[in-house]
Image: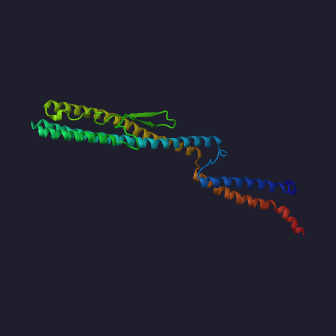
Amino acid sequence: MTVSDISLTAGMRTNLLYLQNTSQLLNRTQQRLSSGKKVNSALDNPTNYFAAQNANQRASDLSDRKDGMSEAVQTVQATNAGITAITGLINAAKGVAQSALSTSDTTVQSKLANQYNTIRSQIDNLSSDSGYRGLNLLSSINTLTVNFNEDAGSTLDVVGFLANSGGLSLSAASGNWQTTSDITTDTAKMDSAISTLRVNTQALAANLNIITTRQSFTDEMINTLQTGADNLTLADMNEEGANMLMLQTRQSLGTTSLSLSSSAAQSILKLF
């Protein structure tokens, strides 16, 4: 059936056109109310749609970087825990050395030297056990690279150091601590090792502060990007609800008007 097969009055065609337009607006308003968005596709508003897509994609990329930052924080904390424990063992070893200095009994000094060597071996164990998910910043000179932005153009390198007995220059007890000079020499090495650990702890603390600061910044950026995308696409639910009521009223009135427009043609039936 072609368009010209049925003849409608001008008034009926006008009312029909208004009803069709109202129906389209009703469908659009229903979609906005159900989705909560005024821009659901590029057809609705290409500029806003693609701008919102870019913002949401960047927010998603930054969210992935947050996972890497969280893992970096755990790695640094594991390293710090190892340094704290190793420092405690060195202080204990210094206590053993002080005991050796306070006696002239060579048998006791020899036993204390063995205790020191045992503590030294435990330092090696702690150093090798301070890794997190396969990365250890204390048993070898590894580097933890933390990416902060979506294209990895902003990074931070956290460089590890050797915190075992070799890296801290803690050699086995010299001369079984039979002389004062042997004990004081090893004590000086322990003091130097503690100083080394303190310096590296400060560096770790500074790096940890940078990472946590970037975490907070990333959270704020993600929130800003998502809010910006929402501002471009979300519908005003109060406005759309009011539109729905008005369109329903308009549709009802349009149907009534169409009925009135056809009354002239219907009056012909009264002739029969």
The answer to whether residue 154 is above or below residue 125 is: above
Whether residue 243 is visible, yes or no, is: no
Q: Tell me which corner region of the image, top left, top right, bottom left or bottom right, holds residue 263.
A: bottom right
Q: Residue furthest left?
A: 104
Is residue 256 toward the left or the right of residue 110 in the image? right
Judge by depth and name the residue closer to the eye, 255 or 106: 106
Q: Is residue 3 visible?
A: yes
Q: Report x, y in % for residue 167.
A: 30, 33
The quadrant holding residue 272 is bottom right
Residue at image position (60%, 55%) is 34
Judging from the image, the colouring scheme is rainbow
The quarter of the displayed image where residue 78 is located? top left
Q: Name the residue: 71% across, 58% down.
A: 251
Frontmost residue, 20 versus 106 = 106
Question: Which x, y percent locates residue 103?
Answer: 10, 37
Q: Is residue 93 left or right of residue 250?
A: left
Q: Position of residue 117 (x, y in %)?
A: 22, 39
Q: Is residue 49 above or below residue 154?
A: below
